[in-house]
Image: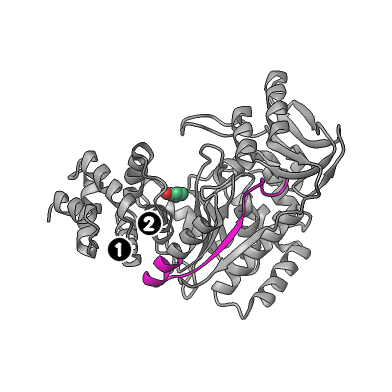
Amino acid sequence: MNPVDIIIKKRDGGELTREELAYFVRGVVDGAIPDYQIAAWLMAVYFRGMTDQETTDLTLAMAASGEQLDLHDVLPGAIIVDKHSSGGVGDKTTLAVGPIAAACGLPVGKMSGRGLSFSGGTIDKLESIHGWRGELSEAHFRRQLQEIGLVIAAQTANLAPADKILYALRDVTGTVPSLPLIAASIMSKKLAAGADAIVLDVKCGRGAFMETLDDARALARQMVAIGRLAGRKVTALITQMEQPLGLAVGNALEVQEAIATLHGRGPADFQELVETVASEMLLIAGGDNLAAARTQVSEVIADGRAFAKFRDFVAAQGGDPVLVEHPDRLPAAPIQRPVPASKDGYIHAIDAREVGLTVVDLGGGRLKKSDAIDPSVGVMLALKVGAAVKAGEILCTVHAASEAAATQAVARLQAAYTIDPAPARPLPILLDRIVEAS
Ligand code: URA
């Protein structure tokens, strides 16, 4: 076998075998295949696509390219369930879903990422709780999973290292938006993290990677197919990311909103999404039906078990539990500036990507992996799509570190809202649910 033959086969539309893909991925990781050949192969995949079987074989080879977690020794007999969001603006879902699922008795041991560009990251959000840390030893990860039933750790460098190399090259060769490559990238990390069953939250809209419903469905179907061929159960939800999720965008603000949601007092769209994802996790782990799962979810929220689980989880990872009890003491920005509506009408759109990028510019996100984050800054929406508004009424509030940053953000946010005279409908949160490839 040699890399040139594999590139030519894909270039000419052939179907690569499991052995060829395993050979290629091995060469990517051990450096035997140079970047220019990897780049040529990525472009061939971009244009020719892959069959479900090829995508699955690629995914499994990528998952096997580094460390692979097996949590069954600490959780004998348990079905290990993971959730994954394809990322979006205001997406603090894991912060609320993790404790709810764990409070229902489902162990959640999760690897999460940091934010990049307009999309935030779970680890950055949790780090706004003083003392909390996501860099854990494997022994700590396992012990906490057993004792608390909930652990969220920063992704280790050695999990699916092939993906790191391929992703970096895709980024600079125009081959990121390839369905098989995205699906293999996401699923290889989930499989390496030891999941038996996965609930995927595929975001769709301006604030997401997949902007159209057709693209989101195609990605969801591909990932469900990989799961089936790899012997894992996968449910994919396609959810709204045309406007920001919930009301809070920004690290500490999002932690506050997640805590409110654990008390059952989250914004309607976010509360609904969180309860839906948690219910799907219970169902995929062997629950009777969605209605029963939903009842269980409502119970642990109502009786405070979900909140208590979050507090215990934060404390177990070094965070100050007083901040969880009193989220108003989380880092707060010195300047809070309202953004008024420029005219009467109805809100037709809130450009989620623009809101996310505004928060990055306020200091709440990063454009390079090495950038530092200000946990206190962000945007609190007051009105969302479908709301009627009068000129001068507050659309949202900017939380900024300086007057100059606030002034810039106000202008951008005003432009991110589309207000028209005709009535507008609120946007549904759940767009589709895919459990079997079709
Ligand atoms: N998220 C990933 O992990 N990989 C991709 O390729 C796209 C989104």
Amino acid on which disc 2 is placed: Pro
Above or below 178: residue 55: below
Disc on res. 54 = 1
Residue 89 in the image, given as x and y percentages of width and height: 61, 44
Q: Tell which of 189 and 303 is nearer to you.
A: 189
The magenta span reads: 224-247
Q: Do we see residue 330 in this rendering?
A: no
Q: Is residue 383 magenta?
A: no
Residue that carries the numbered disc 2 in the rendered image: 180
Does ligand 1 reach within 8 Å of label 2's beta carbon?
no
Amino acid on which disc 1 is placed: Glu
Q: Tell which of 318 and 124 is nearer to you.
A: 124
Q: At x 63% / y 59%, what residue is drawn?
A: 97
Residue 8 in the image, given as x and y percentages of width and height: 18, 52
Gap in angstroms between the C-alphas marked 2 and 1: 9 Å
Above or below 115: residue 302: below
Does ligand 1 reach within 8 Å of label 1's beta carbon?
no
Q: At x 60% / y 71%, what residue is drawn?
A: 282
Mark 1 residue element? helix
From this viewpoint, which residue is outermost toward the left? 1
Mark 2 residue element? helix
Verify CB contact (< 8 Å) between mark 2 and mark 1: yes
Dot 1 surroundings within 10 Å: few (below 14), some, or many (20 or more)?
Answer: many
Dot 2 surroundings within 10 Å: few (below 14), some, or many (20 or more)?
Answer: many
Residue 254: which quarter of the image? top right
Residue 393 in the image, given as x and y percentages of width and height: 86, 35
Q: At x 71% / y 49%, what residue is drawn?
A: 246
Residue 148 in the image, given as x and y percentages of width and height: 59, 60
From this viewpoint, which residue is outermost toward the top? 404
